[in-house]
Image (spheres, helix red, strand yellow):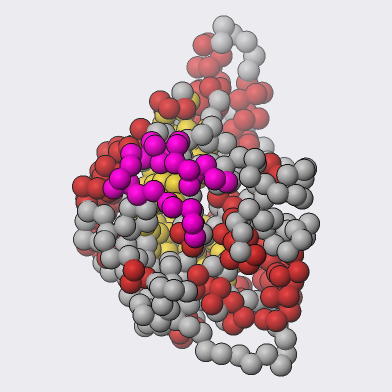
Amino acid sequence: MTKAGPALRLDGQGRPLWLVCELTYGCPLKCPWCSNPLDLDAYQNELSTEEWKRVMRESRTLGSLQLGFTGGEPLMRRDLEDLVAEADRLGYYTNLITSTVGMSAKRLSRLKAAGLKQIQVSLQSHDAATTNALVGASVHDHKIAMIREIKAQGFPVVLNIPVVRQNIAHTGAYLEMALDLGVDYVEFANVQYYNWALVNRDELMPSLEELKASEEAINSFRQRIGKKMVIYFVIPDYFNGRPKACMNGWGSIIMTIAPDGVALPCQEARLLKGLNFPSVREHSVEWIWKESPAFRTYRGDAWMKEPCRSCSEREKDFGGCRCQAYLLTGDGANPDPACSKSPFHHLVEEAIVEAHRPQRNSRPLVMREVGVASSTQ
Amino acid sequence: MTEAARLDPNDIVELHPMYLLRWEEAEQAHVLLYPEGIVKLNSSAAEILKRVVGGRRIDDVVAELTALCDGQDISADILAFLEIANDKGWTRVKT
């Protein structure tokens, strides 16, 4: 899940503070909002254990502090424990971002021994039928059992709910469940529309009324429970009129390494055609971060067009999201259509209207699966 | 946000176990690391937080730091900082 990251608003002074390792695109689930590429089968050549260790070592030398193991489902890598141990030895704060599929109490205790610091679990609803339908597999009960086991083994837990039309009415019940499970953070991750989520946008997008009701439920819950649990919720950019400060700026503090070693300023960036993203198989991490044309393309504000270039908010939101600008307008340097000042803002407004048009012919969700979408898309 | 809750010099505060406090060479500063977040600390904040890892009476922290600051009266500043740290969840009162 791409996110602006509530805790990430800081100046990295040119360092890649956050290293995101997408260990694999493999995943047994079929979430129809998956941020992985549509042509999943085109990327088979995963980095080896030794290659990942080199990436972590080089990035740590550049000043990386936080490390996220994600995917796909990172537990599908049999060497996860080995990679966590190396990351811990290097001095990273290690985060595992998982669906819990492939997790067991035994594996958890090995991860604990390897030095893993925290676990973020995606859970789609308090209701088993909804969770299972949304991810295309019968995993709800396993997820709940694993969240309890994770807490029992003493990890902090971030519970992440990808918010879509199908689960947004569950906000209150979901929070009660989270409190009962004893999780530390709940993150309402309003789904953002790239890759699989863009294909399914009309079916997934909640309405503004639903978002406001959800926000209200969160606020009254917060008042009731105080500091026992931290809850993140931000009105999504489509409805906010302001663009998100995507990635805290392009090539500013976050570096993602895709399963095949391609380095990206964000997990979605590979959809931007023509940027020629460098691979850690061919270049040092230092060269990629500091010198590679791909990381420099949208760094800073020299690339901006009007009205971003003269906007008083350009240092606050960095012109929004390059991937969204590319997907909706065909040019990554255009002002993010989510911004009400963007000449392309009508594209977002029209998408909202279309998704909620009463006469719209609704279609089944396109579930994430190899071969569903071809490489030409 | 409501105002930070008041602390008493007799309270025992501890760094919340979810937070990891350590020196980071590249930053030339202490940092607090926690799930998906980083806080870079200035040196006074770090000096206070270092002393409450595992739990410590606020009075003790004040006495120790006052001695290091040539006896300047810094108790109000320390208390105010710990109230903010508590409010942010970095520290908590140990019961």
Start-end of magenta stretch: A273-298
Mark count: 0
Seen at 33% across and 75% down, the residue is: A28
Query: What is the residue that sits farthest to the top in this orientation?
Result: B70
Q: Is residue A118 magenta?
A: no
Seen at 60% across and 56% down, the residue is: A332
Q: Is residue A292 magenta?
A: yes
| Quarter assignment of residue A228 | bottom right
Toward the viewer: A39 or B44? A39
Seen at 70% across and 69% down, the residue is: A348
From the viewer's perspective, is residue A156 above or below residue B11?
A: below
From the viewer's perspective, is residue A93 above or below residue A73?
A: above
Image check: B34 left or right of A241? left
Toward the viewer: A178 or B31? B31
Image check: A234 left or right of A194? right
| Quarter assignment of residue A169 | bottom right
Image check: A119 left or right of A357? left
Query: What is the residue that sits farthest to the front in this orientation?
Result: A274
- Measured as percent of width and height from the top left, residue A200 is found at 55, 79
Toward the viewer: A6 or A107? A6
- Measured as percent of width and height from the top left, residue A100 is found at 35, 67
Seen at 46% across and 23% down, the residue is: B28
- Measured as percent of width and height from the top left, residue A122 is found at 45, 67
Any part of residue A344 in sight? yes
Toward the viewer: A245 or A69? A245
Any part of residue B54 in sight? no
From the viewer's perspective, is residue A98 above or below residue A284?
A: below
Q: Main secondary structure of the magenta part?
A: loop
- Measured as percent of width and height from the top left, residue A352 is found at 71, 75
| Quarter assignment of residue A166 | bottom right
From the viewer's perspective, is residue A41 above or below residue B72?
A: below
